[in-house]
Image: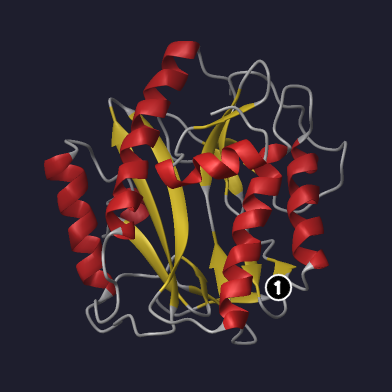
Amino acid sequence: MTKQPQEVELLAESGRLLASVFELLDRTSLVGMSTLQVNEIVEKFIVHDLQARPASKGQYGYGFVLNSSVNDVVCHGIPSQSTVLRDGDIVNFDITLEKNGYIADSSKTYLVGEVNPLAKRLVKTTYEAMWMGIQAVRPGARLGDIGWAITRHAKRNGYSVVREYCGHGIGREMHEAPQVLHFGKPGTGLAMREGMVFTIEPMLNGGRRNVKAEDDGWTVVTRDGSLSAQFEHTVAVTASGVSVLTLRHDELGMIRKMKIAA
């Protein structure tokens, strides 16, 4: 379950490359683009520019390099030529990348064009909730501390936390032990140890937390049709706290604000 220092460094290299994929999307105008077009841009960048492997493609029979979850889609949205991003949408891109045999996993919810204030608030709160969970990571703390921090922030802002999907250990395999729930009680669950590497990836709904899977076997949506947002980082437990392996350059201010080591 724990990784050796050299393994953490290899994971960090995959994380740095994956962060650059999101920085590419940050520079991309998404309005009018299909989610399949975004998938193709990301695949070309990972394979040809970064000389890496899009780890999601072929995993569990999945045929694409990313998940694209628009508006009321909670997770696992399938890229499609017919799903065109419109002004006012929110969309989560969940992307994995393997380099030198080690996998990093991250996701970000984008505001497409001019988005209404309620949707912006949901996205902002979800991002903050992820960081609240990251801030709880340190040796000796418990996995329940992460879930409690996330749920507390979500509930204070009037949002629900999806319970059916969780973070996970990651390394040579995309999904390893332990499971990292986004709800829980402080002081409960597995104790964190230096060298553990896992994802924190809360999904917050604007309405109730209930979700349902669609007939394609992948796409998960909110039962009440409310908006859903998600953010995800891959993190490592260090001797003094936590290192965010998929950190983007624009997040250095958040690291300082949360008093987390870069």
Query: Residue 259: horizontal and vertical position, in percent?
Result: 67, 34
Q: Residue furthest left?
A: 48
In the rendered view, would you say 26 is above or below 212?
Answer: above
Pick the residue in front: 103 or 244. Answer: 244
Which amino acid does the dot numbered 1 rest on?
Arg
Image height check: is 28 above or below 131? Answer: below
> Which secondary structure lies at badge 1?
loop
Residue holding disc 1: 209
Q: Do we see residue 203 in this rendering?
A: no
Q: Quadrant of the N terminus?
A: top right
**Residue 51 visible, this angle:** yes
* Residue at 71% in and 27% down: 138
116 with respect to 67 (left or right): right
Residue 77's image quarter?
A: bottom left
Residue 73 spot, x, y in % from top left: 50, 75
Mark 1 surroundings within 10 Å by alpha-carbon count, few (fewer than 14), some (14 through 19), many (20 or more)? some
Please determine whether, in this image, residue 250 is positioned above or below residue 115: above
In the figure, residue 134 lies in which quadrant? top right
